[in-house]
Image (cartoon, rainbow, N blue to C red):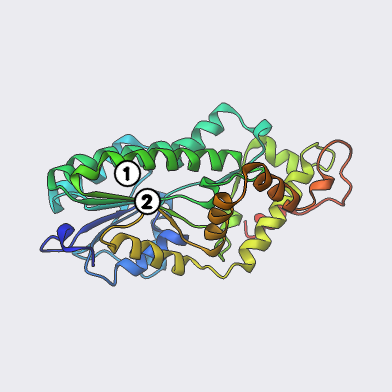
Amino acid sequence: MINSRIDSVEGPVVLVTGASTGLGLALAQLLVRADYRLILTARAASMHRFAEAGLTETSRVWLRPLDVTVADERRRIVAEATEDWGGVDVLINNAGIAYRSVVEHVTAEERFKQLDINFQSPMELIRLVLPGMREKQRGRIINISSVGGMMAMPTMALYSASKFALEGATEALWYEVRPWNIKVSLVQPGFIHSESFQNTVYTAESQKAARDPSNPYYQHYFQMAGFIARLMGASLSTPEKVARKILRTMEQKNPPLRVPATFDASFFALLRRLLPRNLYHWMLLRGLPGVKLWGPGPARLPVGRSLVEEKRNT
């Protein structure tokens, strides 16, 4: 359980976004076995997944539809928690989306959508719960970041931009709310053994480019999609292992600001600290899959399956 300073008689109130699939679901299944009052949220279209996973409402578990990008829905969730349970003691911002696109293939609308879900909406939820936490002089805020928040990969510029923004704002928040005993952490998973890479969203232009071997960026998409799929398939980290790391962070008396949640996250964090920046980027560039095939000229490999592999179940 969380340190006694945050406990209430009936147990701390924990709000988790994006709790119906993947890491969020693994965390929800872990939390329901402990003495917390839970508000597990998901988009309305995903609510059926709770029942499929064996999660049902009880006196201590609320299942609520929430589109984190909709202001009225955010306010409704926090208002209900405040009225019935005295407010949110722990906010875990887990909901997110990942676009796959090179910078040139992104429109302003797509850019804002990525930032809205991964950065703007978590910040707005934080703003809503902070007054109650300050009044109680206790609370926990855990933002689920990514290795993509400490380093950027080609074709994932939008995703990294959103996570870099989340990391910067969370670091500032860590300083700002310490006077009220509010603990703030960033959990940084890397590659997780799952099929979540299939949920990566292509922009209109990146989707066309990934299917067209004559496109200048075709090799970027072809090589990176297969590379990411292989790394996730080979990873020893599972959603359940990362969920346990989140729970341990949540229950620590003095959790760190940044928590690498997988081996590769720890490795890249160490690499960034030890290597001169120009050597660090040179090494990562050399390690990119098929990077010598990138650039001008027609594609030099047969048509790949970068999109087909990721969408094979759709």
Name the residue furthest left. 9
Query: Which residue appears at 28% of the width and 63% of the height?
Result: 251
Callout 2: 10 Å neighbours few (<14), some, many (20+)?
some
Q: Is residue 102 left or right of residue 259?
A: right
Spatial distance from mark 1 to mark 2, Cα to Cα? 7 Å
Query: Which residue appears at 16% of the width and 63% of the height?
Result: 4
Label 2, on which residue? Answer: 257
Q: Is residue 177 left or right of residue 172?
A: left
Callout 1: 10 Å neighbours few (<14), some, many (20+)?
some
Q: Residue 104's image quarter?
A: top right
The total of numbered circles placed on residues is 2
Q: Is residue 134 left or right of residue 22?
A: left
Q: Is residue 306 left or right of residue 56?
A: right
Label 1, on which residue? Answer: 174
Instruction: Tell whether label 2 touches label 1 (CB within 8 Å).
Output: yes
Q: Position of residue 9 (x, y in %)?
A: 10, 63
Q: Residue 210's image quarter?
A: top right
Q: In front here: 252 or 227?
A: 252
- Numbered disc 1: secondary structure: helix
Q: In front here: 112 or 149?
A: 149
Three-letter amino acid code at disc 2? Leu
Query: Which residue appears at 23% of the width and 67% of the height?
Result: 1
Mark 1 and mark 2 lie on one chain; the one further toward the N terminus is: 1
- The image shows residue 72, relative to residue 291, as above or below, that is above
